[in-house]
Structures are given as structure tokens and as C-alpha cells.
Amino acid sequence: QSSEETSGQSEYNLRSPICCIMGHVDTGKTKLLDCIRGTNVQEGEAGGITQQIGATYFPAENIRERTKELKPDANLNVPGLLVIDTPGHESFTNLRSRGSGLCDVAILVVDIMHGLERQTIESLNLLKMRNTNFVIALNKVDRLYGWKVCHNASIVKAMKQQSKDVQFEFRTRLTQVITEFKEQGINTELYYKNKDMGKGTFSIVPTSAISAEGIPDLLLLLVQWTAKTMSERLTYSNIVQCTVLEVKVVEGHGTTIDVILVNGVLHEGDSIVVCGMHGPIVTSIRALLTPFPMKELRVKGSYEHHREIKASQGIKINAQGLEHAIAGTSLYIVGPDDDVEDIKEAAMEDMRSVMSRVDKCGEGVYVQASTLGSLEALLEFLKTPEVSIPVSGIGIGNVHKKDVMKASVMLEKRKEYATILAFDVRATQEAQELADEVGVKIYTADIIYHLFDQFKAYIDNLKEEKKKEVAEEVVFPCMLKIVPNCVFNKKDPIVLGVEVLEGIAKVGTPICIRQCLVDIGRIASIKNNGKPVDSAKKGQKVSIKIIGSNTEEQQKMFGRHFDIEDELVSKISRRSIDILKAEFRKDLSVEDWKLVVILKALFKIQ
Ligand code: GDP
């Protein structure tokens, strides 16, 4: 099998579009991929589907065969479709080149019974960030109550077979999903009704990954639409465009890199440069490998060697010195007229651009990920306003002792940032032991938002603890007016009816007389309509009991030291303001903060 057969050029000289499957967990991404490629498994690779490294290749003839009922003799214009095998964020984020996506198109899978979920939105954000086009597979239509199975049928045909009730449920759920996309700022429409495709309205294809309704529609749409709207992008070129998907040790081959060749041709013996952890790696291709076609797969782990391979293809490359190569970066070819120094520079650019996202102020968490692409996506996520977690350092690969050492620097500055967020990698035992010893937290997860949830829970917990610690010392600002005829006890304890003019009156707050700044004690209890409460807001009328903390305060008396026209205020200090700012910033409104400023002036606090 030559590379010509698997990726032969079409008469229009376009390469095969590269497609990635994304979506929330359990929406059916894996099943959908199986369904697209699986029908012919028994017959080996009948229909020309070939398993490649990290991807499955569907030749145009296969797609034409499967969509002939929908549209006989469809003009496909591309040699085939290359679908990346690992669905989800990781492979998508890896297929990058200088911040833009190498995937030409993505399938965003949404479960029709669940609508948009958290990772759907995460995927949407990644797609937006990389400017990647996508179609939505509204999957699991067979779960609609009373669905009549129509294997491999086009969705229009399948829908005609359904009862009124099924059609009604379908429309209701579809409308709901369309609304949910709108809430994300995205217009969507059933693909066969979408007149605006590619101009801002995204297409929805209802599918079942179990009984394959809608699969012909999905395939045809993907291929025809990409060929039509992306002809420039898909034009075959001799300039090599190639991304490292994974760095892997393979028995008998040493460290290899799995790459997706997006454009151009690779040859055995080519001089290449890849981005490495410790600088650019210059080496030459020792072997270009692909798996044997399924029917020939006799010995596990053996590969077919190629002299040259043409895009688009998933390939394993064997070369020396690849141990520290970084997944998610571009592979460069050194041509006869190229200056290798320029290319080394270009190869490291990926790393530099991600490095530049680290916060310059030097305070923040340490972030570790499996690949440059996932690191970039994680940094992007941490930067969003809703999350907003600063990052002081980054690393790629498993968490080692040296990473813990780096993260531990924060123990002195900001304890909560002495944290490693490890995405899709693990911590070595020594690293974990050291972390436990010095007090660095390591969180590992393979879903971005799980990391965020863990970290947020940790931060919230720290905040609560800190709040408890300083609860004794914190003073909330308040200004109180004594209500006439509501002086219940003049002295020791003072019990008064008051109206909260400004701020928040809280149990525990030290109170002083505004006009003469004489201390009269702390609020020991508050009653609202006879019921004890912890605090009272602006506008509320409550009764408060004030108990002096020392004999001097205990002697203060209504009618002698203060009177009905006197106002009462919280006695604040420099320290209490600092605690308010550090731990209770969000508990105070803008107005409350204005009162702090007034009180600060009143007490002449610097
Ligand atoms: P992934 O996590 O997105 O890769 O989801 P999977 O492909 O592993 O599917 C999750 C579960 O949903 C599995 O139990 C599948 O059998 C089931 N599933 C996937 N697609 C469909 C579908 O179209 N219809 C039905 N009824 N079940 C499906």
C-alpha cells in the first residue's frame, strides 16, 4: 500500500481535511467514531478505511458509498477525510500551530437528552479560540421515546418513519438546544435548513451512534462543506506542515514521535527540527512508520516502513534524540537552502509564545501539563474572568521534585499559590513526598474544570479558615441612629432601639459615640422584632445590647455620656481595615466601603 493510495490527491489538488471529535463526557464521541469507521470491521478494512497513527483515514470512495442513498455520485473534491482517533480536548489542543488550530473542522457532539453541558462549553471556547469551524452532532436520537430504528438512514428519511409524538419530542429538544447555543452567542440550525452555513450559523446533524441514523448526513456534510468553503486552506502544498501529537517510547524503536502531517511530504532521511524541553532538537528521520493494514496485522507492534509519505496522514517517526521533544509543537524540515539556525528559532517559537503567558508579577500557581497544547489551553482557561487564577510557573510532563521546589517558593509569598495544577500528568512518588513535607498542594485531573473545581474548593476552604481566625478582630462598618422612646436600659448593659443608617451592624462590633469618639462597648446581641439575629442591614430597625469590655466602658451611660441625638459608629482601626480588605472584600458593598472611608477619616487612621 503506497501513500498515494491512502492520501492520493484529488483532481482539484486538495488534501484531506482533518477532523476532530469534541464534546462532553458520555455524549457518544467514541461511539460515534466507532460507528463511522466500524461498519466494516468484520471485513478487515473493506471500503479502504485505514488505521493510521492517531487517526483514521476515510477515502472518498468509502464516503461516497455510504452516502449514495442521500446523494448518489456526490462530488466530493477531496481525497478523503482524516479523523483524529482520540476524541476530546487533548488531541484538539495538540493540533496547533502558533496558536491556531490545525484541525480543519470539528464535530461537536451534544447529547440530545442533556443539551449543552460543561465540557460542551469548554469545547466551544477552544473552538472559538482556535477559530475552528465545526458541525454539531445532536447524538442519541434513538433515545427519543418510541424511536423506530432505521439503520444507516439519512436523518430526513429516518424522521419521516417516526410517530407524531417522537417528532414532537425531537422538535422540542432541538429548540431547547438551539436556545442553549444562543445563550453562548452561537447561532445554530438543522443542517438541511441552514441557508447561512459558514457565514455564522452552525449546522446541527441529528445522529445515533448506535443505529447510525444521520451518519451519512454527517459524513457528506463534513466533506462537501469543507471542500467548498476551505479550498484555499485545503490546497495541497509542498511546504511541510506537521504537528507532534505524542512522544512515545516504543519497544524496538526507542523514543518516537507520533505526528499528523497536515501538508507536504516527508521522506526517510529528511533533516528535521522539533521543539524540545531543553532547546531545539535537530535530527534526521530514521524511519517513517504506519500500522499495517488490519488484515495484515500478524505481529503486534510491527509497523510498515515508507520511503516517503504525503499529507494528510498520521505517522510515527523514528529518529535519534527525541526524548525531550514536546507534544503539541510543530515539526520543521531543513531544506537544502535553509539556515538551520533560523529553523531552530522557529521551532522554539511555540514554547516561547506559551511561556509569555506566565504572570510577570511572579505570584501565582504552578501549572504542569502533558503537552504544550494542553498547557496553552489550561493557561487560557485560568485567565478567563470567571476563573482568574494567576500563574507563576509552567512545566511539561510529569511533576518532579524540581517542580515542587519551584512551586514551594510561593509558601513565603502567598501560601494558597504554593500549588501545582497538573493536567493529564501525574506526580512522581518523590515529588508527592516532598510536596507533603513542605506543604505544596498538588492537584491532578484530566479534565480542565475538575482541576479548577479542586483548586477553588481549596481556596474557599482557606478563606473560610482565615475568616474564622480573624473573626474576633474584624470590624464591619456601621452608623446607627438611636430611636426615640426606645431606650430600654441606660447602662451596663446598654439596650437601645436603633436604626442602621449605613453599613452593617454585627454582633461583636465595638461601638463608639460619633460626636465625641467615646467607647461604650461591643454589640453583644441584636434583636429584630424580638428575634435574635447576627446582623442588621442599612434601613433596618433593631434593638441592640451593648456590653462594656472593661470597667471604664461599663460606666458609660445613656443620658450622661451620650444622648438621643448622638449617633453610634463602629470603632475601626488600621488592622481591622486590613482584615476587611484581605478577607471580607466581597462581603461589603460599594456603599459599605464608602462608610469605611468616612470612619477612617473620623478616627484619623492613616
Ligand atoms: P464519550 O465519553 O463521549 O466518548 O461517550 P461514549 O462513546 O463512551 O458513549 C457513552 C455511552 O453512551 C455509552 O454507553 C454508549 O453506548 C452510549 N451511546 C453513545 N452514543 C449513543 C447513541 O447514539 N444512542 C444511545 N442510545 N446510546 C449511545
Image (cartoon, helix red, strand yellow):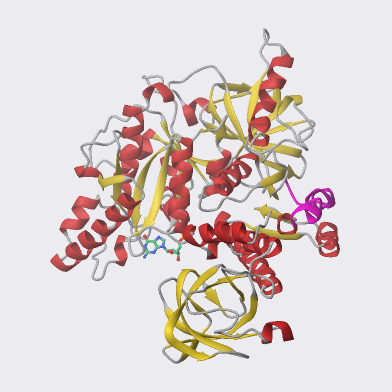
Indicate whether 149 appears above or below 507.
above
Q: Can residue 14 be seen in this view?
A: no
Q: State which quadrant residue 284 falls in.
A: top right
Q: Which residue is at a point 70% across and 23% down the rendered structure image?
A: 272
Q: Where is residue 262 in the image (x, y as percent from the top left)?
A: 52, 29
Relative side of 265 to 153, left or right: right
Relative side of 427 to 487, left or right: right
Which residue appears farthest toward the front when viewing the image? 560
Which residue appears farthest toward the left when viewing the image? 164
Q: Where is residue 186 in the image (x, y as percent from the top left)?
A: 33, 45
Indicate whether 239 appears above or below 415.
above
State yes or no: residue 406 in magenta: yes
Which of these two is toward me, 5 or 84? 84
Quadrant assignment for ligand 1:
bottom left
Relative side of 251 to 63, left or right: right
Q: Is residue 84 visible?
A: yes
Q: Where is residue 469 in the image (x, y as percent from the top left)?
A: 71, 73
Q: What is the magenta segment's predominant secondary structure?
A: helix
Which residue appears farthest toward the top when viewing the image? 337
Number of callouts: 0
Which of these two is toward me, 539 or 94? 539
Q: Where is the N terminus found, in terms of image quarters?
A: top right
State yes or no: residue 488 in magenta: no
Indicate whether 424 appears above or below 224.
below
Q: Position of residue 237 (x, y in %)?
A: 49, 18
Indicate whether 63 appears above or below 504.
above
Q: Which residue is at a point 71% across and 63% down the rendered structure image?
A: 575
Which of these two is toward me, 381 or 99? 381
Segment tinted magenta in the rendering: 396-414
